[in-house]
Each structure stands twice: as C-alpha cells, then as structure tokens.
Amino acid sequence: MEGPQENAEDELILSSLPREMGWAIPDLYLFQQFWCPSILIKEVNIFQKQFEAKDSDIFVASFPKSGTTWLKAITFAIVNRQCFSSIHNHPLLTSNPHQLVPAVEFMYRGDIHCPTTEPRVFGTHTPFPSLPNSIIESKCKIIYICRNPFDIFVSAWTFFDKIKLEPLSTLKIEEAFEKYCNGIIEFGPWWSHMVGYWKESLAKPNKVLFLKYEDLKDDANFQVKKIADFLGFPFTQEEENNQVIESIIKLCSFEKMKNSEVNKSGIIYQFLEKKYFFRKGETRDWVNYFSPSMTEKLCKIIEEKFGGSGLSFMI
Ligand code: PPS
C-alpha cells in the first residue's frame, strides 16, 4: 500500500504529463511517449522496475485489438501440449485466454496472478522501448501480433464503446477516427507501437517474432508451426501425423472460443466482460464502416508512418 507521500508524488508526476480523454478509460497520459491509461501508469511503472524475466518466459505482445486473445490461446496450447493432450479437458475450455496468459500491466491489480508453471506466458500491450530491462537482457522470447490499422480501428471503436468507464459517453465514429489519426488511443500511437517491435524483430529475429493477424487467418497451420519452432517447441513428425497442429487450431478457432461457455459470461481484469473479446473475428470488416475520405486519410497516414520501414499491410 502506498502512503500519502507516494500518492502525492504520483499525482505530481501525472499533473506534468500531457493528458487526453481515452476511448474506454477517461484519462490517457503521454507517458514515455505512449498514451498510457491513467489506471495503468502505476502498474506499468512497477512492471518496469520490479519484473524479473526468466530465460524461459514468453511474451505475447500486441497493440490492443490486433489478435491478442487468439495468439495467447495458441501460444498457451503449443507450449502446454504435453500436459493437456486431450482437447476434451483443456484449460482453454474452462478459462479465458487472458486468465491463462495474464497481461503484465494488470498483474499488479489483484485479480490476475503470475503463472506458476514454466514456461510462463504473459501478455503485454506495453510498447517495446518501455519494456523492463530484464526482458530485453534475458533470453526470453517475444511474439508480436500486428493487424492492419483499418480493422484495428473498427475493432477498437466497437470494443471500447462497450467497456467504457464513467463518465465517458459514446464516441461518434468521426470523433474516434480523428483521435486515431492523431495516435490518441489506449497504448497509441499505433504506428510507433508496431514499428518498435518490427524493428526489433529485424534486428533480433531469434528474440522477437513478428506475426500478422491476416497471415494467421490465411494459413494457420504454417503460422502455428512457425510459432512452435521459434519458441523451441517444434512439432515432431508423429505429432504432425496425429493432427496435433489441426487440433490446436480448432481449439483456438474464433467459433470454438466465442461459443465456449466460459467466454460467454463473466468478467476479467475486474471490469472487462469476456464476451466482448469475441466480435466477428474477420479480416476486412472495415469496409463496412469506412467512408472514401476516411480510407484515403488512413492510407496517407500509413504511407507516412510506415514508408521505408519495410512493414506493409494488405488493405
Ligand atoms: S484485446 O482487447 O487487445 O485483447 O483484443 P484482441 O484479442 O487483441 O483483439 C480482438 C479481436 O480479435 C478477434 N478474435 C479472434 N479472431 C480470430 N480467432 C480468434 N480465436 C479470435 N478471438 C478474438 C476479436 O473478434 C476482435 O476482432 P473483431 O474484428 O473486433 O472481431
């Protein structure tokens, strides 16, 4: 518990930071060059200062609404496949992926606990430059999932509206889009988030694996094998013959997860309804929401922010 002096210091630090209204969280502060939700600043600080990574740790990193839940499920299923070989008694049928693979930012809030078995698998929305040194310096691995910025926008706009905290009211799509184009969104700007992990994946391909939601949709079998190889848990020929990859894909599929009783009701992280993590699970749903001028504007921003980085999106 913090005393009055620490609270006063926290307040003083916050009051010196640029502030904007969030989409779901009333206040976002520009903290270490990203828009950090006020309720998580203390947690991100503790994470940076206290987290001790183990060489065997695995981090599923992402910008919100990029496919985190899906990749958490797949990663958990890959690394624990010896313990839970039967699809009928798998923990993913009785727990939400965010309970099995906790977000480090929420781990210091009380209702989510640090995994007790190794390899420990964690999630994080923290941008690469703000990760604790022990993650950078240890041999732990990071898998980043990236999604095209058009679908992220729609997914975020619909999701944040459902989970928004008082006193926020519904953001019109035009208002949300304006903020999005300025990078003002929980954990934004989205472009620097993606480019940060992208560059690190190029510099250290054994440390950071960069995946795209669209590629996972397109050829899950190939991507699941790639993840397993990267993590040092490759599938044996016997496993391949026994359709182990296919059963992991099926277990983690959108339909299976959305329709699983455990994901239909209840909350996690103290305020998030589990059912809202599963909406359509498709690519290109953005065409149903974007006007021609929005499309043109976002294309320009993508060109400006990603040009020369080598990172591109199939629009
Ligand atoms: S969060 O809040 O950051 O953890 O959200 P995140 O999981 O990153 O993104 C949510 C979007 O991913 C879709 N989703 C899936 N797609 C494919 N397969 C599976 N299993 C799956 N689970 C969740 C979810 O529906 C959100 O996308 P949209 O476009 O809104 O449907």
Image (tube, rainbow, N blue to C red):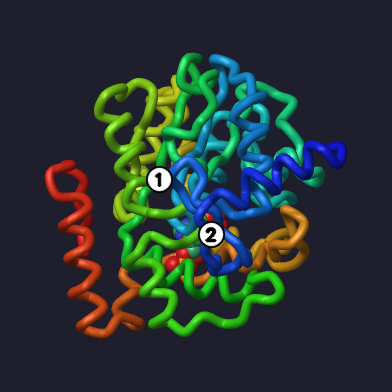
Report the residue that reaches farthest toward the left: 308
Residue 254 visible? The answer is no
Image vertical order of residue 212 relative to residue 27, above or below = above
**Alpha carbons under labels 1 and 2: distance apart:** 28 Å
Residue type, label 1: Ile
Q: In terms of secondary structure, where does tag 1 sit?
A: strand
Q: Which residue is mark 2?
A: 19
Q: Residue at x 57, y 49 (%)?
A: 16
Quadrant assignment, res 268:
bottom right
Residue type, label 2: Arg
Image vertical order of residue 232 relative to residue 210, above or below = above
Q: Residue at x 48, y 34 (%)?
A: 130
First of labels 1, 2 by sequence position = 2
Is residue 254 rendered to the left or right of residue 203? right
Where the N terminus falls, by quadrant?
top right
In the foreground, 44 or 234: 44
Is residue 24 rendered to the left or right of residue 285? right
Image vertical order of residue 239 relative to residue 218, above or below = above
- Tell which tag, 1 or 2, sits nearer the viewer: 2
Where the C terminus falls, by quadrant?
bottom left
Say if disc 1 is inside 8 Å of ligand 1. Answer: yes
Q: Mark 1–mark 2 contact, CB under 8 Å? A: no
Q: Which residue is mark 1?
A: 145
Quadrant assignment, res 152:
bottom left
Label 1 neighbour load within 10 Å: few <14, some 14-19, many 20+: many
